[in-house]
Image: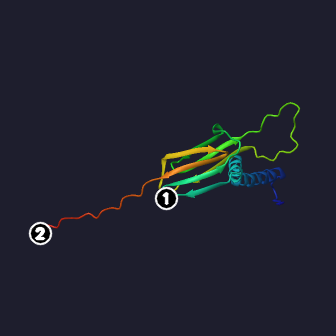
Amino acid sequence: MDIRIPGLEAPLLSTLQHIMDAADDSEKSFNAPTRTYVRDAKAMASTPADVKEYPTSYVFVVDMPGLKSGDIKVQVEDDNVLLISGERKREEEKEGAKYVRMERRVGKFMRKFVLPENTNVDAISAVCQDGVLTVTVQKLPPPEPKKPKTIEVKIG
C-alpha cells in the first residue's frame, strides 16, 4: 500500500508501515499454538487408551510395551484430571551395530482424562503387566437419599 501525502517524508511513511506490519505479525504469534501445546497434542494423539466403566470403578488401559514402572507416571491434577505420562528412550547403540529400520515409537507420551464427579481420587491403583498399564479409579458410594424432614405442627 503506497500512500503519498504532500509534506510528509518517505521515511516517516515507511516507519508507520513497519509499525502496522509489526502489529499484524504480533497478532499472528498470539494466536499460534505454543511449542508445549503442540508437543503435548502429539504425545496425546500417539497414546491410545481404552476406558471401561464397572459398577464400582473406572479402568483405564494403555499399551506400554518395553517400559519399566520408573518410566511411567500416573498423577491426578486439579482434583479431577488423571494424567498418564512417561518417556520411551531409544536403546543405546552397541559398537558395530546400526539401525537398518526403526519403526518402534520413542519419545514422550501422555494422556489426560477428566474424571467424573463420582470418582474417589484417594483410591487409585496402577499396575503394569506384560506391557499393559491398567489404572483403576474407584467410584464413590452413591449418596444416601435424603429423608424428608418432618416438622411438628403446634396448635396455637
Query: Closer to the observer: label 1 or label 2?
Result: 1
Are the residues at dot 1 and dot 2 in contact (C-beta closer than 8 Å)? no
- Residue extending furthest toward the bottom: 155
- Element assignment for label 1: loop
Q: Is residue 95 depicted above or below 58 in this figure?
A: above
Examine the image and state in which quarter residue 91 appears.
top right
Examine the image and state in which quarter residue 6 appears.
bottom right
**Mark 1 vs 2, N-terminal side:** 1
The count of marks equals: 2
Residue drawn at (60%, 48%) of the image: 134
Label 2, residues with CA under 10 Å away: few <14, some 14-19, many ≥20: few
* Residue marked by disc 1: 55
Residue drawn at (79%, 34%) of the image: 92
Image position, residue 27 (x, y; %): 71, 54
Q: Nearer the viewer, residue 115 or 25?
A: 115
Image position, residue 110 (x, y; %): 66, 48
Q: Nearer the viewer, residue 156 or 140?
A: 140
- State which quarter of the image contains the C terminus: bottom left
